[in-house]
Image: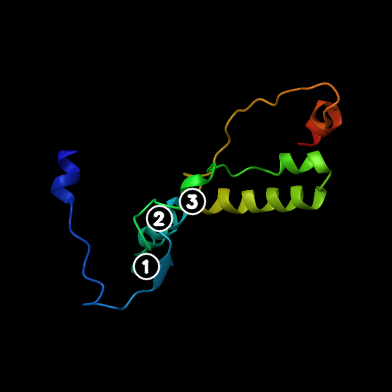
Amino acid sequence: MKRFIEDYQPAPDASQNPDFDIIVLGGGITGAAVAYEAAAHGYRVCLLEKKDFGWATSAATSKMIHGGLRYLNNLEFGLVRESLRERRILEDIAPNYVYPLPFMIPNYKGHLMSNRWVIKMG
């Protein structure tokens, strides 16, 4: 904590220097991550939030980048492919944020996920 306090510098007044490479609208977890990554890559970033940072929509997300397994329930194979493609892109862009996590699937008799072929496809 001491190091953070020593390194802390207040944010510059945006009205004094309105030149930004990127303006991110929304200061939830998604907007903050986008702003962080852009700043880490050398862009001048302005992060704007209507209320308070972390206040609204992205606070309600599961923060999970899934591969579309849930779409197998409705046999939506196109969405499964799209989810897998998007997940691979995110893994390449931000491997420190997107990584595999173990999980368990409840197995109810008669439920589509109880079919072995569906699980194997996932």
Residue at x-position 72% and y-position 53%: 82
Image quadrant in which the C terminus is located: top right
Residue 100 at x, y percent in the picture: 58, 36
- Circle 1 SS class: loop
**Which numbered dot is residue 32?**
2
Instruction: Tell me the residue that label 1 is attached to.
Output: 43
Frontmost residue, 10 versus 100: 10
Residue 35 at x, y percent in the picture: 40, 60
Q: What crowding class fits label 3: few (fewer than 14 Cα within 10 Å), some (14-19), or many (20 or more)?
A: some
Classify 74 as above or below 16: above
Q: Report, in whole angstroms, how far the alpha carbon at label 2 lies from the one at label 3.
A: 10 Å
Instruction: Tell me the residue that label 3 is attached to.
Output: 58
Classify 73 as above or below 48: above
Res. 101 image quadrant: top right
Q: Report, in whole angstroms, how far the alpha carbon at label 1 lies from the one at label 2.
A: 14 Å
Name the residue type under label 1: Tyr
